[in-house]
Amino acid sequence: MSLWEAADFLNEIVDDSDPDTDATQTIHLVQTGESLRQMYPGEEYDWLHLTGFLHDLGKLLAHPKMHNLEQYFVVGDTFPVGCAHDQNIVFSKYFEENPDFNDPRFNTKLGIYTEGCGLDNVYMSFGHDEYMYQVCKQNNCKLPDEAMYIIRYHSFYAWHDKGCYDYLCNDKDRKMLEWVQKFQKHDLYSKLPEKPSLEKTLPYYRRLVEKYFPPVLRW
């Protein structure tokens, strides 16, 4: 199906883990996109506007007509696997119940990785971020690297908010980190009480979807 058809599913999903809003995810996506559009106007940043609109689209994993996953599989912080878990990850104390916690292959600082290997070579926990990143990548979307980093790592709070896991990063990761951090202000603080007019805003994002994505995607 098309990305636009997939976006319709978010009209029926409310993120139960998000204390800032009880609006559907479609409203959240438009608010994020419009916030970015105000701060970064112009066609040169249209990729960023679209990224705001689709960054949480992976939450359709929870929709009954899609993958019907429980929300605890879909939302929340993301983090590297295959190495020691950082204490700055939300609810990190529960990692003690994970067999990897006591496995010498996976419980050291670097684990299965080498220092400076780059996040492209790091396995991340699965959730809506990783799913949507893989959808974009495997369907050959035309979004720039900055957008792909935002989609994949916007829930990697231990990295972009707390400065953890830098020892896994390379120069490209550190350069892209700036865009992930800029994006956060529009993701977290754009959830205003007044709802945007979907009738007025959605045609703009429809045009961007047609510009950056093929007509039909494999989900």
Image: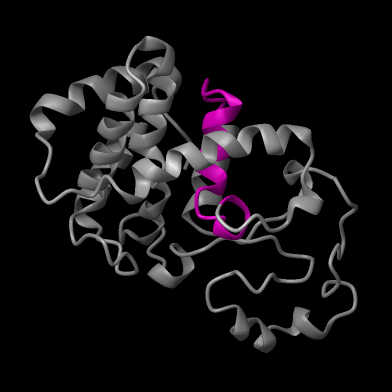
Could you say where residue 150 lies in the image, as x and y percent from the top left? 52, 39
Vertical relation: 131 (above or below) 33: below
Q: In the figure, residue 78 lies in which quadrant?
A: bottom right
In this view, the residue in front, 97 or 35, is 35
Residue drawn at (32%, 41%), measured in percent from left and top?
A: 6
In this view, the residue in front, 12 or 154, is 154
Position of 67 compared to 106: left or right? left
In this view, the residue in front, 213 or 188, is 188
Position of 150 compared to 86: left or right? left
Q: How is the image coloured?
A: one colour
- Residue 87 shows up from this direction: yes
Q: In the figure, residue 145 lies in which quadrant?
A: top right
Could you say where residue 204 lies in the image, as x and y percent from the top left? 23, 20
Residue found at the very far top of the displayed protein: 43
- Residue 1 shows up from this direction: no
Residue drawn at (12%, 38%), measured in percent from left and top?
A: 196
Residue drawn at (86%, 72%), measured in percent from left and top?
A: 108
Does the stretch in magenta take in 155? yes
Residue found at the very far bottom of the displayed protein: 97
Vertical relation: 92 (above or below) 205: below
Could you say where residue 188 lies in the image, as x and y percent from the top left? 35, 51
Residue drawn at (81%, 52%), measured in percent from left and top?
A: 167
> Which residue range is magenta in the image?
139-160
Quadrant where the N terminus lies?
top left
